[in-house]
Image (cartoon, rainbow, N blue to C red):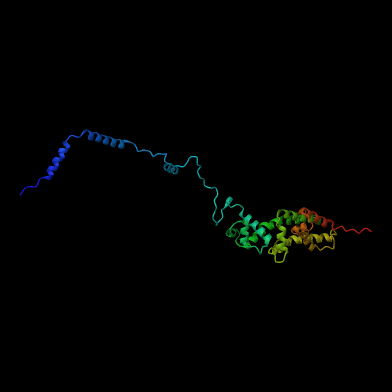
Amino acid sequence: MARQPKTNRQSKTNRQSERSRPIEPGRQAASRQAERATRERSAAPTARPNDSDPIRRAAKSLRKPDAATPKRKRPAAFKRAPGRPLRGAAGGDIRGALLDAAITCFTANGIAATSLREIATQAQVTPALLHYYYGDKAQLIEALVQDRMLPAFGPLRERVIAAGDVADTIAVFVCGMTEIMKTYAWWPQLWVREVLCEGGVLRDLLVTRVVPLFARTIASRFAAAQTRGELNADLDPRLLIPSLIGLTLMPAAGAPIWRAVFEADDLGLDDVRRHAIALLDRGLELKAPMA
């Protein structure tokens, strides 16, 4: 049986003969050029991207902010969510602002007809904030009496009690009431609506906390002057206080009416004061008609 040829040995012999065969000049030059190009590529630094490409420029501008563009600053103030109010200067005089809003609503609509929500809307706050400071409506009314009405009327009461004779008492009352109405423009309307009118919420203020000592002191002073013959005996000392209030508060409360009726926009509180003092001091000075 014939032996098979040794293919492995023959292939090895053929490879060795190929390596020993001289390289042609053209192939040798091409090989050297390829090796040189490979070395140059490995030794050369990484090429920088072409900045002329618009896409690359846009990406670069996003990565690095422009030096000319100012940095965004955090706003100094921010809107605070409703809740417990800030203390200190940030809170401001919020109690006074709430009382001012309440007085505006009470004067326009009456205390009984005004809701806490309407007061909060007038003050531009939430009802929760109004409730935080004053609780319910009763506490708000009590704060109005304690913080606004009594402080306004207190100095006048002290000056009237400290006055001397009847003429001094009348002048102090009229002038002091006029100054109150100048400082607190809401006083006449609120007093007439809530104190003098039937069903007024503040009537107890008049009966129990403002008038008793004040009115009795003046009435006793007028009665003593009558006893000494210094005052008209036909006057009732108990009605002098309502007369004084009628000559000061009522003209001020009804000023829009009288200005419209008499076309007298120039009527002011100083005119009310002068008229009241002249009427109380000299009366009408009635004279007999000339024959």
Residue 163 falls in image quadrant: bottom right
**Residue 18 location in percent, x, y?**
16, 38
The residue closer to the viewer here, 224 or 96, is 96
> In screen coordinates, is 283 left or right of 14?
right
- Asked whether the viewer can see residue 163, the reply is no
- Asked whether the viewer can see residue 156, the reply is yes
Q: Please identify the quadrant where the C terminus is shown.
A: bottom right
Residue at the outermost right position: 291
Where 211 falls versus 63 (above or below)? below
**Residue at left offset 75%, top offset 55%:** 178
Residue at the outermost bottom position: 199
**Residue at left offset 61%, top offset 58%:** 121
The residue closer to the viewer here, 19 or 138, is 19
The residue closer to the viewer here, 38 or 100, is 38
**Residue 170 location in percent, x, y?**
79, 56
> In screen coordinates, is 144 left or right of 255?
left
Numbered label tally: 0
Residue 41 falls in image quadrant: top left
> In screen coordinates, is 43 left or right of 20?
right
Residue at the outermost left position: 1
**Residue 97 location in percent, x, y?**
63, 55
**Residue 259 location in percent, x, y?**
77, 56
**Residue at left offset 64%, top offset 57%:** 101
Where 113 falls versus 40 (above or below)? below
